[in-house]
Amino acid sequence: MRICIDATALLLRSAGIKNYLYYWMRALREYAPQHHIDAFPLLGSVDSLDHDRSILTPLQTYPRIGVLQFINKVFPPAINAAVRNVDVFHASNQIHAVPRGVKLTGTIYDMTCLLMPQFHTPANVRAELRHYDRVFKRANGLIAISQSAKEDAIRLLNLNPDRIDVIYPGIPNAYFSAPPAKQKYKLEKPFVLFVGTVEPRKNVDTLLDAWLQLPVSTRDAHDFVFVGPIGWAGSATVNRLRSGIHGVRVLGYVPEADLPSITAAASVFAYPSFYEGFGFPIAQAMAAGVPVITSNVSSMPEVVGGGGVLVDPQSAAELSSAIDRLLTSQTERKRLGLQGRELARKYTWKNSAERSAEFFTRLG
């Protein structure tokens, strides 16, 4: 079967979806040789991942973006020529046209544009709503990256549950074996780690409030390290991060290759997001053996299982108490770290690719 995956996100600045597409496509090509995997728009091989920019050079990227814009804004039927001889087209929200004469599929990442539109730009909300109408409601089959995401999509869009397969993403193997590394980024103290784009949904202000509520002795002995680019975040949040709060370190964007070792070096991983379709940073921290504190909502309890501490994302006091408890208990950190790593072993890209291959085969 010839499958074409809309991988436009690999040409853009993106985090979770780009991460998913990069590893998922590579895994499909490795572990599902019975299918031929193409990438729209004419991406060919996918060699390296950079969340902050296109995976291709500017000279390679601009013509491909031009093709996308021509299809979206000038002549939508051109999508049929762009994906000719394809059996399945796996669409993203970047492409506005749907090809004819092929099976249509897509991935349900999350439903935040309907559940929490205040956490998105108006343009993002419009793009997602268009995607729901043109792809989700018409698709021959859909992949949901968690049971939580599937249930939200069924409830909000009245989708047929029989058309949706829950297929968990994987975790790069490096997270299971990365040696802790502090020297490159001058991480001298034990530290709490957050990894993610700084945007309203990630709840960074509550993290800062929780940090400031810790006992002075705990804060003096530790740092709080923030890793990730500034996304669609309010200026007040960004100003707080950069205001020089004692112990708060802001590293900004860190290359993908450095993330496993930074994660493995953390004492605690804190991620009180308001909503996640899966939550890659959580699963990656678990794989690295780092105890996780995350929210008791959406997919996060599903992903963490018994390998982390769940808190109310609205409560800085509850979050602060959980951080303090783990930072001051080596026994509890070790227990949760070991348990989390064992639970994370089910999240492999090999499993994801093999389940996805079965999903595509059934469509044929």
Image (cartoon, grey):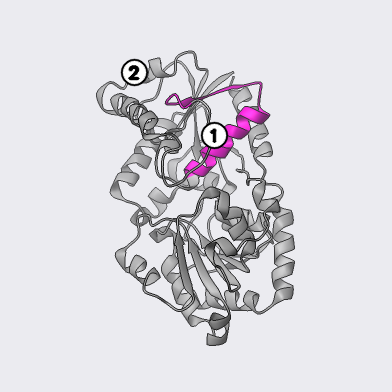
Residue placed at 57% from the left, 39% from the top? Answer: 23
Q: Amino acid at mark 1?
A: Asp
Say above or below: 41 vs 175: above
Q: Residues within 10 Å of mark 2 (few under 14, many from 20)?
A: some
**Which residue is outermost to the left?**
74
**Mark 1 or 2: the one toward you:** 1
Among all residues in the image, which is located at the extreme top? 85
Q: Label 2 is placed on what type of residue?
A: Ala
- Provide residue 172's location: percent of width, then percent of height: 63, 45
Q: Residue at x 53, y 56 (%)?
A: 298
Residue 228's x, y, as percent?
Answer: 46, 57
- Mark 1 highlights which residue? 47
Classify mark 1: helix, strand or loop.
Answer: loop
The circle drawn on residue 78 is 2
The 10 Å Cα crowd at callout 1, few under 14, some 14 to 19, many 20 or more, is few
Please name the residue shown 35% across and 26% down the image. Answer: 97
Q: Secondary structure at mark 2?
A: helix
356 to 271, vertically: above or below: above
Magenta residue check for 364: no
Q: Which residue is at a point 63% across and 69% down the rendered structure image?
A: 267
**Does residue 40 belong to the magenta stretch?**
yes
x and y percentages locating residue 268 in the rendered image: 61, 68
Earlier in the chain: of badge 1 and badge 2, it is: 1
| Distance (Cα) linking label 1 and label 2 | 28 Å
Can see residue 162?
Answer: no
Q: Which residues are magenta?
A: 17-43
In this rendering, position of residue 296 left or right of residue 53: right
Q: Is residue 69 above or below residue 307?
A: above
To which quarter of the image does residue 84 belong? Answer: top left
